[in-house]
Structures are given as C-alpha cells and as structure tokens.
C-alpha cells in the first residue's frame, strides 16, 4: 500500500503543477493586453498634449493675424490723419488709433501668455516622450520574457502530460477511483495529504491515537475522519 500511496502522491504533484501552469498560461493574454494598454495610454497622453499645443499655436497665429490687421488699420488712419481738415475729425482719428493700439496691447499680452503655455506644454511633451521610450522598451522586454516563459511552460506541460499517463497506469484501478472521487467532490484541493505527529496536514486536526498508530502499518487505505482525505505517514 505504501508504494501505491507514493504513486498517488506523485500523480497529485503532477496534477497540481499542471493546474498551476495552465492557470499561468491562461493569464498570459491578460498580461500582454495590460502591457499594450499601458503603452497605448501613454501614446494617448502624448497625443492629447500635442493636440493642446497645436490648438495653442493656431490661436497664436490668429492673434498674429489680428495684430497685423490692426496695424494695417492704424496705417490707414495715419494716412487719413494727414489730410484731416478740422480738429474734431483729427481728435476722432487719434481716438481710433488709441483704440487700435489698446486692442493690440491686449492681444500681445495674450500672446505672451500663450507662449508661456506653449513652452510648458512642449516641455511636458519632451518629458513624456522620454518616458514613453522607457515604457515602450520595458514593455517590449517584458513581452519577450513572457513569450520565452510561456514556451518553457508549454514544454513543461507536455512533459507533465506524458508523466501523468505513465503514473496513471501504475495506480490500482480501485485506488484510483477513490482518489478521483475525492478530487471530484472538492476540485482544486489535495486528495492525498501527509500526517505528522498525529496531525492531518489537510485540515490541521489531530487524529485519534488508534488511527494514527494504524497508519504506520501501511496495510490499507485510510482517511482523515475530519476532512475525508486519503492520509499517510510523512517521513521525518
């Protein structure tokens, strides 16, 4: 019976590692998607900043055009001013020149503000682009690492499947049936657990002294009265 228990433990180890590998492989796509999303999010941040600076530059050009129009208007008024006939008209034209000058002054103040904003935005873009290079390279490196790790896991999975087939054939059919029944009742949990110092390692409950002593005989299959798992003596 001890040999059969050892075979069951080996089978369980194979199945446990197989489940872990399959779970890891199932998470590969999510990891790759998260890496791509991180890179994409950074690209969108840079694109948004570039849209901002393009809007600022457009508005700045509009201000330049407005100033030019006002200067042309002022020149025309200056021409008129030279041919004015009376003081009233002269004062009116001077007022127009003053108004145009005031508008240009306001526009120039806004242009200075926009230049500051463009400078800040350009610095943000430069910083983000430097950060993007690092993020892109790190993501590329991590994706390559994930790819290599995935290939290794797939290879190991193939090896485990072969071992599992071999070990299945070594287990007594009746014992295998009991083992599979326990696994079916509690999927994902261990069906075979060791006992040490009269404690079941499956549920951490102390076994009755008689049952604990019987385990040393290794003459039949025994179960924990608390968690119903197959139990065996763990060597020191």
Image: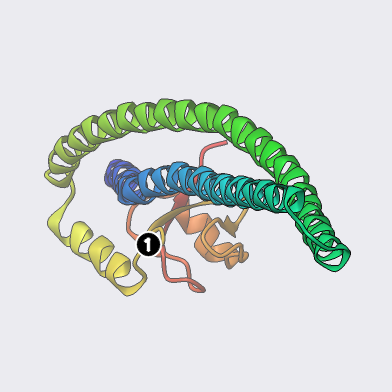
Image position of 224 (left or right of 72): left
Element at label 1 = loop
Query: Around disc 1, counting alpha carbons within 10 Å, would you say few (fewer than 14), some (14 to 19), or many (20 or more)?
Result: few
Residue found farthest to the front = 85
The structure residue drawn at horizontal position 72% and vertical position 46%, both measured from the top left corner, is 111
Image position of 162 (left or right of 90): left
Find residue 8 and report its horizontal and vertical position in percent. Answer: 29, 48
The structure residue drawn at horizontal position 34% and vertical position 45%, both measured from the top left corner, is 28
Vertical order, 120 against 22 (above or below): above
Find residue 209 and report its horizontal and vertical position in percent. Answer: 60, 63
Q: How is the image coloured?
A: rainbow
The structure residue drawn at horizontal position 66% and vertical position 38%, both measured from the top left corner, is 124
Quadrant location, the C terminus: top right
The structure residue drawn at horizontal position 35% and vertical position 48%, both measured from the top left corner, is 16
Image position of 91 (left or right of 173): right
Find residue 100 and report its horizontal and vertical position in percent. Answer: 75, 56
Vertical order, 222 against 82 (above or below): below
Find residue 226 and report its horizontal and vertical position in percent. Answer: 51, 74
Q: Which residue is mark 1?
A: 188
């Amino acid at each position: 019976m001890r040999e059969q228990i050892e075979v069951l433990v080996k089978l369980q180890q194979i199945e446990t590692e197989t489940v872990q590998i399959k779970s890891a492989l199932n998470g590969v796509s999510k990891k790759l998607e998260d890496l791509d999303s991180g890179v994409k999010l950074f690209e969108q941040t840079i694109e948004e900043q570039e849209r901002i600076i393009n809007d600022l530059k457009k508005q700045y050009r509009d201000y330049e055009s407005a100033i030019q129009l006002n200067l042309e208007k002022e020149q025309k008024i200056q021409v008129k001013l030279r041919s004015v006939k009376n003081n009233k008209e002269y004062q009116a034209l001077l007022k127009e020149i003053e108004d145009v000058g005031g508008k240009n002054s306001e526009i120039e103040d806004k242009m200075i503000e926009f230049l500051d904003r463009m400078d800040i935005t350009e610095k943000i873009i430069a910083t983000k682009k430097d950060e993007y290079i690092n993020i892109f390279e790190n993501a590329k490196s991590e994706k390559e690492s994930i790819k290599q790790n995935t290939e290794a896991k797939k290879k190991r999975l193939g090896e485990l499947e072969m071992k599992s087939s071999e070990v299945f054939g070594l287990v007594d059919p009746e014992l295998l049936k009991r083992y599979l029944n326990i696994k079916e009742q509690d999927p994902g949990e261990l069906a075979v657990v060791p006992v040490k110092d009269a404690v079941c390692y499956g549920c951490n409950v102390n076994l009755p002294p008689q049952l604990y002593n019987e385990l040393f005989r290794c003459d039949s299959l025994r179960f924990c009265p608390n968690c119903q798992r197959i139990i065996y003596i763990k060597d020191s």
